[in-house]
Amino acid sequence: MAGCRGRGVHRRSPDREGSLPPVRLGQHPTISRRGSRRPLSTLVSPELPAVSRALFDTRDEGEILRLTMDHVSAVGPYRAEAGYLRVHGHMVPSPGVGPGHASTVDRAVRELTGRDVPVSVPGRSRGRALALHGPGGLHGYLVVTSRSRPTKAQHLLLATLVRLTAAALSVAVAHRRRREDALELHRLRRERAAFQRRLVSLVVELGYQRAVHEALAEVAASGGGEEAITSALHELTGFPALVEDRFGRLRSWTGPGRPDPYPEPDPARHEEMLQAIARRGGPVRIKDRLISLVRPRGEVLGVLALVDPQGDADEYTMFTLEHAATSLALELSHLRHLAEVELRLRRELVDDLLGGTDEASAYARSEAFGHDLHRIQYVVVVQWRNRAADDAFARTVGRVATAVGMPSLVTRRSDHVVLVAQGSPHDHALYETLARETGTPDGTIGVSARCDTPDGIPGRYQEALRALEVRRRSRTRYGTTFFDDLGLYRILGPGNEYQELEAFVREWLGRLVDYDGGHRTALVETLSRYFDCGGNYADTAESLAIHRSTLRYRLQRIREISGHDLTSVEDRLNLQVATRVWKIMLGGPG
C-alpha cells in the first residue's frame, strides 16, 4: 500500500483550514470522489442561470452588484460583506448593499490595485476582496467571507458568479457610456442646432443692420434732410415716420395717417415728455408712438418717431429707429453748424452794409448767399419783448421772413435783429407770423423806405430805427411801422439831416415843384400862402393879388397834381410843414 501510495497517486497538501483559495477564472475542472469523475454541471446551483439572466437584463451597475451580493450564499458557504464600484477612478461603496463594515474594509479596498487579496472583516473570518475585471478595466470589488471551508466546486461557482458579475458590469458600463455618449451627442446636436439658428439669426440681423446702414448712409451721402430720412425709415419699417422740432411742431411726415391739422403741442407737457425720454434713454413708447430723441452732443434738437398703434414693432424696428435718430442727429448737427457759419458770414456782410461798404464787394458777397442786392431792398429792425436778440432769435426771424416772402440777410444788435430784405414787405405779415412763432404779440417792427443801391442802406437803417422808436413811444406799442407812413414824424427828433428834410419836402411837394418849374406857375407858393392865411380864401386871394375864382382853380390843380387831399387833417398838416420847410429852410422857389 505504501508502494501503491508512492506510485501514481498525487497527494495534494490540504489547504489551510478556514481560508479561501484564490479563485482562478476560466478554468473548468472536474471534481473527483471515490475514484470516479463527475461533471461540474451536476454541481451547479439551480439559481445561477436565473441570476445570470437577471444580471444581464439590468443596466444599473448598483443593481447588478446588489443581485450578486444577494446570491453569493447560493454558490457556497459565502457571505457578501461589501460591494464597491469604481466611479471616476475611486472605489465607492455601492449604496444600499452590504452591512457596511466600518472603515477598515473601505481603506483596504481603496488601496487595492486590481488584485484579489485577503482582507480582514471585523467579526468575520476567511475574508477576501475579489476584483471585478471586465474588458473595460476594473469595475469594482466584491468582499466575501466564508462560514466554513468551501470545496473547489464552490470556489469555481463563486469564480463563475464573479465573472458573470464583471461581464454584466462591463455590459452595463458600456450601455451607460453609450447612453451617455448618445445623450452627449444629442446635447451637442441641440447645441449645434441652437448655434446654427443663432448663426442664421445673426446673419439675418447683420444683413438687416447692413441694409439699414447702407440705406441711411445713402441718404446722408445724397445730402438728404429730414424728409429723406423719414422716407427711408418708413420704407425700412413700414410704419409712418415723423420728425418734430424741439417744441413739438411737425417738420416732416412720411406715410399714411397724417393728422390735418397737426395738433398744437402743450409746451409744459411736451417738455415733461422730453425729459422722461432723456432719463430712460433709447426709443420709448408713448401711447401709439415709438419716440427717439434727436440730440447731438446732448442738446435736444427734436424727436424722430414711428406711429405704431397696434404695438407691432420688434427689435429690428427699434434698431432702425435708433440708427435713424443717430443719422438725423448727425445731419441736423451738420446743418446747424453750416447754418451757424453761414449766419456768421451773412451777419458780417450785413454789418458791412449797415456801416457802408464797397458796392462791388457787396454784390459779389451777397450773390454767394443767393441774395440779389441789385433788386430794391428794405431795412427791417425787429425787437421782441422778453426775447434776447441772440442767434436763436435771429435764426427764427430770418426763417419767418423767408416764409412770408421776404428773403433777407440777417444780423443782430444788442437789443434787436436787423434784416436787409429783398423786395417790399407784405404789410403786417412778418409781425403776425412772428407773434404765432414766439407765442406772444409783444413785438415791434420798423421798416425803412425803399433802397435802390447798397450805399443807401446805412441811411435806411436809421429810418427803420426811427420807425421802430415811433412805434415804441406810441399808444399802440406793438406791431409794424413803416417809415413811409410816419409823415411829420420823419423830421422830428434829434439827428435829422438836411437830406431827410429835403426828402420829406420832395415826398409831399415834389410833383408841384416839378410842375411849377416846367410850366412857370406858382402852385407851391399859392399853397404856402393858403396855409399862412389859415385856409381863408379871401385873405389868400388878396395876398396873391388874384381873384378868388383863380385861387379855387389853383387849389383844384394842386389836388390833382399832388394827389393829396386838402380836406384830410393829416395831409393838410404834412403839406403845411412841407411848405414851411420849403420856404424857410430850403430857400423857397430857388
Image (cartoon, rainbow, N blue to C red):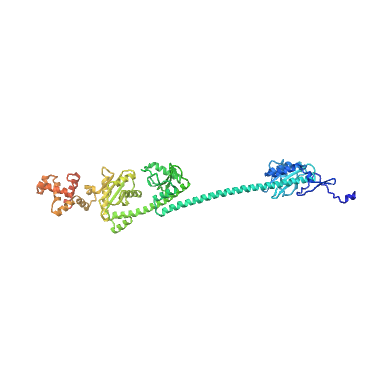
* Residue 337 placement (x, y as % from top left): 38, 53
Q: Is residue 298 left or right of residue 183?
A: left
Q: Is residue 144 left or right of residue 429?
A: right
From the viewer's side, name the closer residue of 350 and 220: 220
Residue at screen point 35% across, 54% down: 342
* Residue 117 placement (x, y as % from top left): 75, 48
* Residue 87 placement (x, y as % from top left): 67, 47
* Residue 559 placement (x, y as % from top left): 16, 48
Asked if residue 544 shows in the view, the reply is yes
* Quadrant (top left, top right, bottom left, bottom right) of the C terminus: bottom left
From the viewer's side, name the closer residue of 296 and 492: 296
From the viewer's side, name the closer residue of 67 and 29: 29
Q: In this view, which residue lies farthest toward the bottom?
A: 360
Residue at screen point 40% across, 41% down: 269
Q: Is residue 198 left or right of residue 309?
A: right
Q: How many marks?
A: 0
Asked if residue 587 shows in the view, the reply is no
